[in-house]
Amino acid sequence: MEDWLSREFVTSVFSRLKKPNGMEYDEKTLKNYVTRMMTLRNLNLSDALVDPDVLYTALRTRYSKMTSVLSIFRPAGLFVASLNEEEAGFLKPTMMKGAYVRRHHQLLREASALRRRQDCSSQESKRV
């Protein structure tokens, strides 16, 4: 599956990405997102893109800090949500993007809450 996940393809998908207010993302952010997707590919986790639960679990297993998990998990969700029907067929022919995006959003909220708890506990340990 990783053959189709090239830098050029990822860049073309992210180039269509719009913020919720309709504005385009700045170039630096898009380059960062492309880099994160290439990291995902280099970690041999491209196959995990078909299921947000599998991807989230794999990233949690690989990284101890939630900040690291979020730095890859967030762009991966945006990438999948930005795929058109034909492109999503490369990933999984029967993918239900709506269900994928809802589940990704739930996991993103969970990961963000865990990151806040990690940040708070690390700040408290510095004070002691």
Image: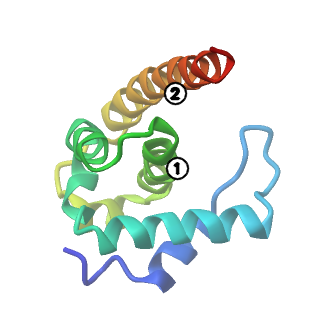
Residue depicted at 45% across the width and 36% down the height: 66
Residue depicted at 28% across the width and 67% down the height: 43
Residue depicted at 32% across the width and 71% down the height: 41
Residue 113 pos. (x, y %)? 51, 18
Answer left or right for 71 relative to 4: right
Residue 10 pos. (x, y %)? 48, 73
Amino acid carrying mark 1 in the image: Ser
Q: Quadrant of the N terminus?
A: bottom left
Does 104 sit above or below residue 36? above
Residue 70 pos. (x, y %)? 49, 42
Q: Secondary structure at mark 1?
A: helix
Report, in whole angstroms, how far the alpha carbon at label 1 lies from the one at label 2: 11 Å
Residue depicted at 31% across the width and 47% down the height: 59
Residue 87 pos. (x, y %)? 35, 67
Mark linked to residue 71? 1
Q: Secondary structure at mark 2?
A: helix
**Callout 1: few (<14), some (14-19), or many (20+) C-alpha neighbours within 10 Å?**
some
Does 95 sit above or below residue 28? above
Amino acid carrying mark 2 in the image: Arg
Q: Nearer the viewer, residue 120 or 47?
A: 120
Q: Nearer the viewer, residue 65 or 92?
A: 65
